[in-house]
Amino acid sequence: MIHKRKILALFILSSLILSVVQIVFSASFTTAGIDLNQLQSKKKDVEKQNLLIGEILYSQSSFTAIAKEAASDGFVDNKKAFEDVNTPQAVAFNQ
């Protein structure tokens, strides 16, 4: 009879301890899940901002945007300033 009471008490005590351990782990996993969701939402925001910044960079670095900016800064298109490197030119006149 005494052994049965000890076994019953041990069983009840172990089930209480395991219940408390389960509650602690559940709470820690829940907060870890909340943190994970926050990190994932921040990651999505950063990816969205990265796409927007990339689009702005591509639009501002296009040739037409650079040409408009150069024209507004006073640069002119002078075709005579460039030499054609494909036409042979004499290096020395008197040989």
Image: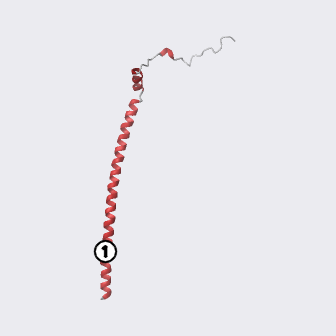
Task: Residue lying at the far front in this picture: please name it.
Answer: 73
Q: Nearer the viewer, residue 62 or 68?
A: 68
Q: Which residue is mark 1?
A: 15
Locate the N terminus by quadrant: bottom left
Q: Position of residue 54 (x, y in %)?
A: 39, 36
Q: Residues within 10 Å of mark 1 (few under 14, many from 20)?
A: few
Task: Residue lying at the far top in this picture: please name it.
Answer: 94
Relative to residue 87, is residue 25 depicted above or below?
below
Q: Position of residue 21 (x, y in %)?
A: 33, 69
The quadrant where residue 13 appears: bottom left
Relative to residue 52, is residue 20 depicted above or below?
below
The quadrant where residue 28 appears: bottom left
**Count of numbered tags:** 1
Q: Position of residue 5 (x, y in %)?
A: 30, 85
Relative to residue 77, is residue 66 depicted above or below?
below
For the rendered model, the colour scheme is: secondary structure
Residue at 32% x, 63% y: name it.
26
Identified by mark 1, the residue type is: Ser
Locate the C terminus by quadrant: top right
Task: Residue lying at the far bottom in this picture: please name it.
Answer: 1
Q: Position of residue 59 (x, y in %)?
A: 38, 30
Residue at 36% x, 40% y: name it.
49
Q: Does dot 1 land on a helix, a strand or a loop?
A: helix
Residue at 36% x, 47% y: name it.
43
Relative to residue 22, is residue 80 depicted above or below?
above
